[in-house]
């Protein structure tokens, strides 16, 4: 049973990362898209976060059960991996989800400013600032580093 639980954990982790890849690709594309209306069309590609949340839960359930079956909860490496996962999740929500709202509001302001003629230069500067915010780089580095640390902890169980 333990092997099946580990298999399911890894399978759902891969599916979670696959679903997550769409969000990462869109986030990185925002940086190169100068047209606010085209930027807003990227939001059509993004599905509800429900799928990622479901996959995260499905990834966690077999992991927790397998950890109980194997007695891993008495080891430090599993607690460290949970801590890394929670820290990475916090950074993803704070800088990842926050970036989408910054882009959307800046794009809408620029579109409205161009329609009404109300200070489009300022709105363009805000949109460019939003596009060039460091959020995509931060979440990419933290996500990859966090994944590497968790994989190392799970594979080598150092403590």
Image (cartoon, helix red, strand yellow):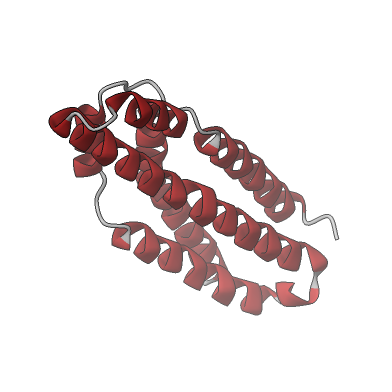
Looking at the rendered image, the quarter that the C terminus falls into is bottom right
Q: Residue at left 31%, top 43%?
A: 104
Q: Quadrant of residue 87?
A: bottom right
User: Can residue 42 be seen at all in this image of the molecule?
Assistant: no
Give the farthest residue toward the right: 159
User: How many labels were placed on the picture?
Assistant: 0
Measured as percent of width and height from the top left, residue 139 is found at 55, 42
Measured as percent of width and height from the top left, residue 48 is found at 26, 56
Taking depth in this image into account, of 101 and 19 the one nearest to the observer is 101
Question: Is 74 rendered above or below residue 129?
Answer: below
Taking depth in this image into account, of 68 and 91 the one nearest to the observer is 91
Relative placement, left or right, of 50 versus 154 is left
Measured as percent of width and height from the top left, residue 72 is found at 72, 72
Q: Residue at left 33%, top 23%?
A: 121
Measured as percent of width and height from the top left, residue 86 is found at 62, 63
Q: Residue at left 13%, top 31%?
A: 115
Relative placement, left or right, of 34 versus 151 is left
Give the farthest residue toward the left: 115
Question: Is 106 rendered above or below residue 54?
Answer: above
Relative placement, left or right, of 150 versus 42 is right
User: Can residue 138 be seen at all in this image of the molecule?
Assistant: yes
Q: Residue at left 83%, top 55%?
A: 158
């Amino acid at each position: 049973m333990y092997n099946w639980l580990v298999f399911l954990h890894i399978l759902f982790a891969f599916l979670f990362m696959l679903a997550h890849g769409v969000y990462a690709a869109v986030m990185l594309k925002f940086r190169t898209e100068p047209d606010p209306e085209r930027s807003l069309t990227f939001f059509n590609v993004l599905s509800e976060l429900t799928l990622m949340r479901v996959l995260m839960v499905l990834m966690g359930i077999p992991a927790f059960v397998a950890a109980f079956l194997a007695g891993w909860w008495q080891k430090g490496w599993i607690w460290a991996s949970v801590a890394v996962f929670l820290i990475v999740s916090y950074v993803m929500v704070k800088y990842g989800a926050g970036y989408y709202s910054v882009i959307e509001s800046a794009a809408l302001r620029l579109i409205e400013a161009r329609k009404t003629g109300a200070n489009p230069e300022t709105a363009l500067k805000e949109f460019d600032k939003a596009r060039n915010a460091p959020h995509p780089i931060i979440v990419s580095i933290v996500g990859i580093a966090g994944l590497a640390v968790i994989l190392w902890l799970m594979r080598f169980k150092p403590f």
